[in-house]
Amino acid sequence: MARRIIVDPITRIEGHLRIEAEVGENNEIVDAWSSATLWRGFELILKGRDPRDAGLITQRFCGVCTYSHYEAATLAVENAIGVIPPANARIIRNLIKGSQYLHDKIIHFYHLHGLDWVDIVSALSADPRKAEKMALSVCDNPYNCSVSHYKQVQKRLTTFVNSGRLGPFAHGYWGNASFKFPPEVNLVIASHYLDALHVQRTAAQMMAIFGGKNPHPQTLVVGGVTSVMDSLDAHRIGEYLFRLKEVKNFIETAYLPDVLLAAKYYKDEGASGIGAGVKNYLAYGGFPLDDDWYNTLLPKGIIVGADLSKVFDIDEEKIAEHVTHSWYEGNNALHPSEGETKPNYTGFDAQGHVKGEEKYSWVKAPRYEDKPMEVGPLARMLVGYAKGDKKIKSLVDTVLSAAQIPAAALFSTLGRTAARCIEGKLVADHIEGWVYELVNNIKGGDQRTWTRCDIPQSGQGRGLTEAPRGALGHWVRIENHKIANYQAVVPSTWNASPRDAQNKRGPYEEALIGIKLADIDQPLEIIRTIHSFDPCLACAVHIIDPRGNEIKQFRIQ
């Protein structure tokens, strides 16, 4: 007999997410529903504002992908008014964004996703000498690796346990049969969890050097950047490079080896395609290598049905958002530039379950040619791999070979997690080159960081980029020199989307189908797969009426 289970809220994410799953025989998930349970109203704040304010406001969608929304909003306005920033501004933007990527990858694997793989309690029984050998088996010079250090980590964790104040380790599903690491691997990765608390701070400092501060940078402007003195100061550039060296070393000697250990012990799940999802992938491209965004480090394209033999170009006009199963009025699928959102909250049934085929989420359902699309690091790495991008293909093949897993294993929860690490290495490898590109421009006499521009009477534009979590698009319409309409379709709008008009599940939902739970009362496998997408529901829920009418009033008790 089928049983419904609800995980609400999903923790270790940004925002409010509820997952409901129907579990059949043998504890196998046969159906699932993804619900965003927090309603927001950011785009209403933008109406009537100067378009140049959009970036500073939209980066407050959340406290994680701050720069990404700042960039997308700035690109949208630049596209609307037809301005191209100078080369130095493009490079500095890449340096700020690169630091955000490194910061995001490290935090995600260790502090948001790591405890889905690592049994902290098991680490207490590990043999530190065996842990040292385990770390050396996947890296010649592992990060912070010694018997004495691992003993100190065990002592620190034991103190947590004995104090009864477990902090981030409280309420874990410790001992669950779905954990597969031996105690020594648990100890190695737990030690890096603690190390990452420091390293992620260093990555945040990198952003602040050119971005002004973190988490909400303030140096982007329509037409370029304002961090002129930082770009001309050799000491500031040296500070950036010094911190880059530390973060890059952690990625290469801790993060990547830990992912290889995960691949070793979870390879069967990867080979079985657990958590694969919709198997359609979309990437807008990110980190421009020239001034018109034609060439980008992160690739552009679409893959359909996990077919790596063909990558399709993106036609932006084929994007539409459905609201059939979202808590808004209407059933029309609209392009984001024409988006309208009128709340129609109908809630859950008396038992607290979704109402059959009705509405059940504040997130809309973006589709490309009526297909649900997964976005994010896996999408980007697959598109690059399928296109034959030499840098991406080399990194992916190296990891696949070291982990002794086939390329098909990328279509899984494990593959999604590995792709994020591979992408972190890719970005880290290119940042130093951007620094020297900036230095060479300045030495050659080009110190421009801004292109003068004015806001026209009217205009319409979009900014398409890649946030760490995936494809990000902002659309803006300008009338009377002010913002008349604004719409954002963020990575978690794509990934967390509910069913569409054709009743096709969104990527989160589809990724859960077929997963078996070791213990139905400890749905660790649900958490692990959902976390592999790195959900950000704070970014995903927005509201706008393009005609400027009052939509609804809500009283919060």
Image (tube, helix red, strand yellow):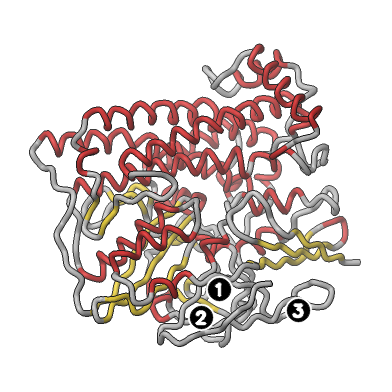
Closer to viewer: mark 2 or mark 1: 2
- In space, the residues marked 2 and 1 are separated at their CA atoms by 9 Å
Residue 356: give its label.
Answer: 3
Q: Is there a contact, CB below 8 Å, between mark 2 and mark 3?
A: no
Callout 2: helix, strand or loop? loop
Disc number for residue 485 = none
User: Mark 2 — residue?
Assistant: 341
* Position in image of residue 296 (x %, y %): 31, 51
Label 3 neighbour load within 10 Å: few <14, some 14-19, many 20+: few
Give, as a three-letter code, the residue at label 3: Gly
Residue 287 against residue 237 in the figure, above or below: below
In the picture, the quarter occupied by the C terminus is: bottom right
Mark 2: amino acid: Thr
Determine if residue 35 is in view: yes
**N-terminal-most mark, 2 or 1:** 2
Q: Earlier in the sequence, mark 3 or mark 1?
A: 3
What's the amino acid at mark 1? Answer: Lys
Towards the viewer: 260 or 468 = 468
**Could you tell me residue 12's position as x and y percent?**
64, 49
The picture places residue 53, in percent across and down from the top left corner, at: 32, 64
Query: Measured from the top left, where is residue 164 in percent x and y?
Result: 80, 33
Residue located beneath label 1 in the image: 364
Local secondary structure at mark 3: loop
